[in-house]
Image (spheres, rainbow, N blue to C red):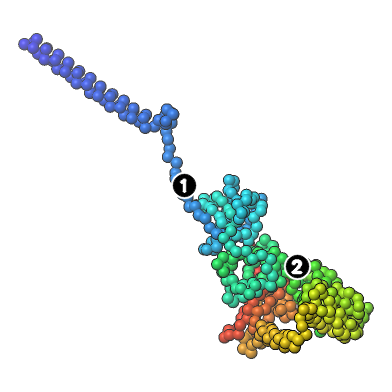
Amino acid sequence: MNNKLQNFFLGTLIVAGIVLCAVLFASESSSKAGNGAGTKNTQSPSGSTAAIINAPTTAVDLRTELAVITYVNSGTKRLSVRTYEDEIDYTFYVQEPALIYSEYGNAMTMSQLNAGNVIDITFDAASSTVKEIHISDGVVRHLAVSDAAVNTSYRRITIYNKNYEYSRNVVVVSGNELITPEQLSAKDVLNLYEKDGKVVSIVVTRGHGYISLTGVDLFVGGYVNIGSENIKTIEKNMMITMTEGEYKVSVSKGEYYGAKTVTIIQNQVTTVDFSEFVADTIENGNVLFDINVEGANLYLNGKETDYSEGMLTIPVGTYTVRASADGYENYEQNIEIKADYQKVNINLKKIEESKSTTQKTTTASTAASTETSGARAEETTTIVSTKNRVYIDGPTGAIIYFDDSYLGVAPLDFAMVTGQHTFIVVSGTTVKSYTVNLVEGADDVRYDFTNKTSN
């Protein structure tokens, strides 16, 4: 009995040991399997056991826009643009390997870019990274335009008798600075870029400055001639707008005459003083010879005379005037030069024209002249309003000129004169001009030309 009991306990211990070994073996196998799986997942293709951390995904918003450069600095790599369609302003810091090309596909550098350039720019809006810049070939270029007329009421500019609309935020550049369309002058020379009849940008290549006449008390009511075309009646305190450049400025009235050569600088006032000419004077007349054949020769009393610079100032008296040109009949006539301004029109006739057509030509010329005069009168007709006034509120203390004539010191007001006009505003050392269109209506018009530029 004792042997049986002993055998039972011994068998139980053996079975328990086998079960315990089986459990331990199974547990160890499971652990190894788990470790093996983890090692497999963390190994790199090269066999390294370093853990791989997934990098965050960078957002990309790649765009290509027609835009206008509003600021560029190759030193700091800063580039600011305004998109054409949405008029959104962006600023980038252009880094390599950004690619810059001309409209012909030639490589460029950032230093060759200028404010006012129209470009096709490809950039990542999410990271503000510029990829490519191309000078756009998708716009029409009108270069070296002069006598442009700006209508601020309808937001349009007229060149070569064709109108182009512009938006409120159109880019206009003068001297690498942004200006407003109303600060353009008919005296400016500019490049205009347009697309489908709408202005994309305007770049002033030759701006305008101003001439202030002093020492002209004895010349008031006479004439001032600037260059070959600009002839005005002299007034006190007048300010004359001119394209920048070098000009001969002459003043005359009766026997008094004076002339000087001056240089007009953009946005600056050039003061020309004529008081020194008053004491030493001779009696002169001012005459402008307008010959219909370019390059024709002009003779006064048998002496060939250069009339290419415009108005001539010569002693009063009677002159024999002769004009000639190859292929044309000679012109000869006696004229009297008086101590005043006069214009002499000389029409040379081709040699092959028969005298039988003279009467017909004269009649046609008279009719054409009448028609032209009528058209000109219609263009320049203005109305002084009896119900509307124009108020200039600022800058306080600024000197205001209206179409080159002194108006007064701001704030001021005056009866509205309809049509297109130019204000010149002299505030301290700053001189600016503004083109406006005045239309008679129910309300008065107010302007404040105070500089609103923020820091």
* Residue at the extreme right: 280
Q: Residues within 10 Å of mark 2 (few under 14, many from 20)?
A: many
Q: Amino acid at mark 1?
A: Thr
Report the residue marked by disc 2: 244
Packing grade of label 1 (10 A; few <14, some 14-19, many >=20) is few
Looking at the rendered image, the quarter that the C terminus falls into is bottom right
Q: Quadrant of residue 13?
A: top left
Q: Is residue 95 visible?
A: yes
Asked if labels 2 and 1 touch by Cβ distance under 8 angstroms, the answer is no
Nearest the eye: 142 or 39? 142
Q: Residue at x 37, y 29 (%)?
A: 39
Residue at image coords 65%, 72%:
160
Q: Residue furthest bottom?
A: 386
Relative vertical location of residue 317 with respect to residue 248 in this rendering, above or below: below
Q: Position of residue 394 (x, y in %)?
A: 66, 75
The picture places residue 274, in percent across and down from the top left corner, at 86, 76
Q: Is residue 356 left or right of residue 80?
A: right
Residue at numbered disc 1: 58
Q: Nearer the viewer, residue 164 or 368?
A: 368
> Quadrant of the rendered structure where residue 335 is?
bottom right
Q: Residue at x 58, y 58 (%)?
A: 136
Q: Residue at x 68, y 86 (%)?
A: 371
| Image height of 115 relative to 289, above or below | above
Q: CA distance from mark 1 to mark 2?
A: 52 Å
Report x, y in % for residue 210.
Answer: 76, 72
The three-letter code of the residue at mark 2 reads Glu
Q: Is residue 163 above or below residue 344?
A: above
SS at mark 2?
loop
